[in-house]
Amino acid sequence: MKQFEYVIKDELGVHARPAGLVVKAAKEFESEIVITKADKSANAKKLIALMGLAIKQGDRIIVKISGEDEDKAAAEMEKTLSEIL
């Protein structure tokens, strides 16, 4: 399992457009990708679940990836988050 933390920099937080881009990136991989904020978690491949976390600017999220392609998935998810959020 791979795991990393990321602090949201976008002033609007995780709204529809960036959430859609995160989901699109996550769906490229076989690995399970879970995003956690405080005590809530969501499957990164599910748009509504991800938006339900209500992630705001300054929030710290934890991204956990497990599966056959977890190394590649972790690198791509970290890149995606840094580019859009």
Image (cartoon, rainbow, N blue to C red):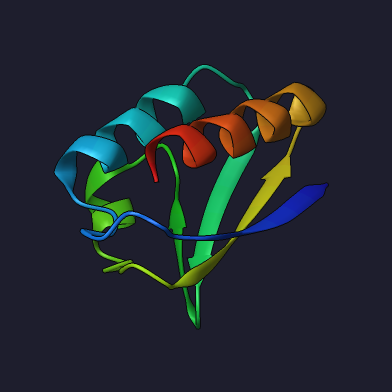
| In the image, residue 70 above or below residue 28 | below
Q: Position of residue 8 (x, y in %)?
A: 44, 60
Q: Residue at 37%, 33% (x, y): give it.
A: 23
- Pinpoint residue 35: horizontal percent, then vertical percent: 52, 56
**Placement of 80 over or under 60, stated as above or below:** above
| 69 relative to 30 in the view: left or right | right
The location of residue 32, given as percent across then percent down, is 61, 39
The residue shown at (28%, 59%) is: 13
Q: Quadrant of residue 6?
A: bottom right
Residue with the most extreme top position: 28
Say whether residue 66 is left or right of residue 43.
right
Q: Who's the residue at 44% across and 73% down the image?
A: 59
Q: Position of residue 1 (x, y in %)?
A: 83, 47
The front one of 78 and 43 is 78
Q: Quadrant of residue 73?
A: top right
Q: How many marks?
A: 0
Locate residue 37 relative to residue 56 in the image: left or right.
right
75 on left or right of 83: right
Which of the pair 35/77 is nearer the observer?
A: 77
Residue at image position (62%, 22%) is 30
Residue that lies at the very extreme toward the left in this rendered image: 16
Query: Is 26 placed above or below 35 here?
Result: above
Q: Is residue 14 above or below residue 76?
A: below
Q: Quadrant of residue 84?
A: top left
